[in-house]
Amino acid sequence: MIQNIVKQLDPLPSKSKLVIFGGGFSGQRIASVGRHFGANVLCSRRKKNSKGADFIFDSNIKVSNEVFEGATHVLSCIPPLLSGEDPVLKQLKTQLLNSKKLRWVGYLSTTGVYGDTQGKWVSEDSSPNPQQERSIRRFSCEKQWLETKLPVQILRLPGIYGPGRSAFESLISGTVKMVDKPGQVFSRVHVDDIAGAVLFLINLFSQGKDPKVINVADNLPTSNLEVIAFAAKLAKKPLPSKIPFEIAKKSMSPMALSFWEENRKVDNKLLCKKLGYSLIYPDYKAGLKNCFSKLK
Ligand SMILES: NC(=O)c1ccc[n+]([C@@H]2O[C@H](COP(=O)([O-])OP(=O)(O)OC[C@H]3O[C@@H](n4cnc5c(N)ncnc54)[C@H](OP(=O)(O)O)[C@@H]3O)[C@@H](O)[C@H]2O)c1
């Protein structure tokens, strides 16, 4: 429920206009919360008939200046191009720099920029050490945004889940795999906490609390086995047998394998202790209960 997200948030100033590039899973949820506060929110998608497409943006298509008229807040939820360029900056850097009313610019990045720490915690003070090609591109995009000198905040996200994108989908379709890699954990964040954190950070930013980089993760990095087992219990589905990682990896896509090759726990103390954001779903159990309630 949107009420769960907004209860601890201050409303955006009146006449706020939030332009979201990449109205996918997170972008649409952030847009809903922004609209709840009365902001004028515009979301981009690449195809005209896509759900929630307020305007079309593709790295190869020009965007009309109208989109930026009166924009007070801009958020990019779009991953880097294969060239390493940021799609939004590649097309629209000049318009952004010329936007006179801009008070905040957010960039959704990934905790992949920290690389593999063999299960150790990473905070915003940890030196980025991206090892995967896509994480190298991501770190380059973070730098491109910071170099603009716009009022930018980088939000580093671990695995995103939420209704429609959680362990239940693979459990129900029968495609779930119980990959067993002892010691391996993943950090994650519920999409509602991304939306909550974005609006929370926008407000703090206007009060001068403006860290450049913030991890947005829940409190409990956990193995995938535990997450699937909890989801199966809720859904009353049988658990498939465990598959040792060394066997499972033979049939994994290069993308899936790359996630299993890195092991880290993402520290959220800056967001949740120093800045004071209160997570709606502090761990996977609370988050999965929400996802399960939306299945019915
Ligand atoms: N999924 C995860 O677990 C995860 C974890 C950490 C970080 N992230 C990053 O966090 C951000 C938000 O994640 P998400 O899962 O909410 O994203 P998502 O659902 O995949 O949405 C991505 C959005 O970017 C748009 N897009 C992609 N390439 C584009 C291009 N070249 N030009 C214009 N638009 C483009 C997509 O357009 P269409 O709507 O037209 O498809 C979509 O709206 C992304 O940058 C993602 O890489 C994701």
Image: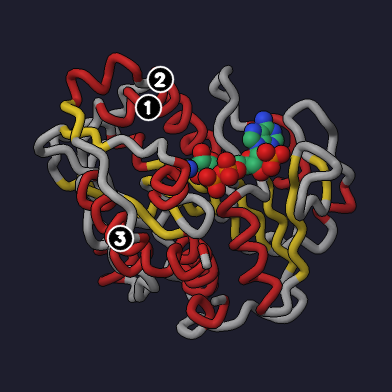
Identified by mark 2, the residue type is: Ser
For label 3, count other residues whose C-alpha is less than 10 Å away and answer few (under 14), some (14-19) or many (20+).
Answer: many
Q: Name the residue under label 2.
A: 253
For label 2, count other residues whose C-alpha is less than 10 Å away and answer few (under 14), some (14-19) or many (20+).
Answer: few
> Within the displayed image, which quadrant is ligand 1 positioned in?
top right
* Mark 2 lies within 8 Å of ligand 1 (Cβ measured): no
Q: Is residue 286 above or below residue 6?
A: above
Is the Cβ of the residue at disc 1 closer than 8 Å to that at disc 2? yes
How far is the residue under mark 2 from the one under mark 3?
Answer: 25 Å
Residue 91 x/y as whole percent: 74, 32
Residue 170 x/y as whole percent: 43, 43
Question: Circle 3 — which element?
Answer: helix
Residue 31 x/y as whole percent: 66, 63
Identified by mark 3, the residue type is: Tyr
Q: Residue at x 76, y 55 (%)?
A: 52
Q: Name the residue under label 1.
A: 256
Q: Which residue is drawn at 79% across and 50% down?
A: 53
Q: Name the residue under label 3.
A: 284
Q: In this view, does 100 lie above or below 10?
A: above
User: Could you say which is closer to the camera, residue 28 or residue 57?
Assistant: 28
Identified by mark 1, the residue type is: Ala
Q: Which residue is drawn at 62% across and 54% down?
A: 27
